[in-house]
Amino acid sequence: MKNILLISVVFLFSCTSQKEENLLDTTTSTEEIPNTAYVMVLGIAQDASYPQMNCKKDCCKAAWNNPALQRTTSCIAIIDPTTNEQWIIDATPNIKEQLQLLKSKTGTEKVDGVLLTHAHMGHYTGLMHFGREVMGTNKVPVFAMPRMKSFLEENGPWSQLVELENISLKKLKSDSTINLNKNIRITPFLVPHRDEFSETVGYEILINNRSLIFIPDIDKWEKWETNITELIKKVDFAFLDATFYKNGELKRDMSEIPHPFVEESMELFSSLSDADKQKVHFIHFNHTNPLLIEESSAQKEVSEKGFNLAKEGQIIRF
Ligand SMILES: [Zn+2]
Ligand SMILES: [Zn+2]
Ligand SMILES: [Zn+2]
């Protein structure tokens, strides 16, 4: 009798774990991993991630109580399954969780290189995890523009990563293309931003003759000499700064921290064809941005107007 009871308990237990595995399977298999190089979104929030430290307002209330609503700082990975290599653009304060997300999809959290956009806290401070106190890595290639590179070389604690050769800095030049490997080409380009410690770049990634631009941070579009609307027509995917949804979102002078409001961007891009609008994926959402709230009227407005929102774990095929 005791044995039968034990067997039934074991059987019951294995049934539930089987069920859970199946559930997990269906969520991950909805998007199959490509067999050629691709991009994966690892984070979508502004530098401070979501919810934001100390925020007691409605924007963050639900997310404090529900980890499923929390979002990490904007970051994308470039993955080549044919060579088993993977790179990340920006080392965010959430790099630990983001590499776990990457591992859950690709089977490894190995990083073959980091490409940095600029020296604001959400975009490079994750480098600290490569240091002696954590991974103690050996010469992880870190690609940076000249001012960004000097900033890391000349200021602690980053200079220690350089001296101990935890990271190996590679100097980038704007508008100059590098080959990450034989399948992936990448080009940094300068964008206007509050450049206190470094210049700021966006990146164009070229795979299979298709291209993706990633611009997580930029001041107003009109401050950039490049015409963003024309650029969207030329590329295949555009991941663009969507820090704030609209003016008045912060109760402070928003001209001190200029970003294109999503409302302004949608107006600017309204002349694009439906196919071109579909290329736009908004990213880098501040905690106050209603695009972080599932089913919000802002989310509905963006999709009704024909644009997309970047999602964590999203896979972009080339
Ligand atoms: Zn940022
Ligand atoms: Zn908030
Ligand atoms: Zn910034």
Image (spheres, rainbow, N blue to C red):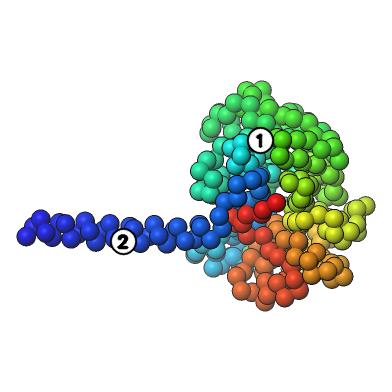
Give the label on residue 16, or none: 2
Where, by quadrant of the figure, is residue 180 drawn?
top right
**Mark found first going from the N terminus, 1 or 2:** 2
SS at mark 1 in the image: strand
Q: Residue at x 61, y 36 (%)?
A: 83
Residue 277 in the image: state x and y as whole percent: 78, 66
Q: Amino acid at mark 2?
A: Thr
Q: Nearer the viewer, mark 1 or mark 2?
A: 2
Q: Amino acid at mark 1?
A: Gly
Vertical relation: 29 (above or below) 148: below
Residue 111 in the image: state x and y as whole percent: 60, 37
* Left or right: residue 4 compared with residue 47: left
Which residue is tagged 1?
113
Where, by quadrant of the figure, is residue 37 drawn?
top right
Looking at the picture, tell me which residue is in the foreground, 297 or 175: 175
Can residue 96 be seen in the rendering of this structure? Answer: no
Count the numbered circles shown.
Answer: 2
Q: Residue furthest right?
A: 225
Q: Residue at x 87, y 70 (%)?
A: 271
SS at mark 2 in the image: helix
* Left or right: residue 152 compared with residue 102: right
Give the label on residue 154, or none: none
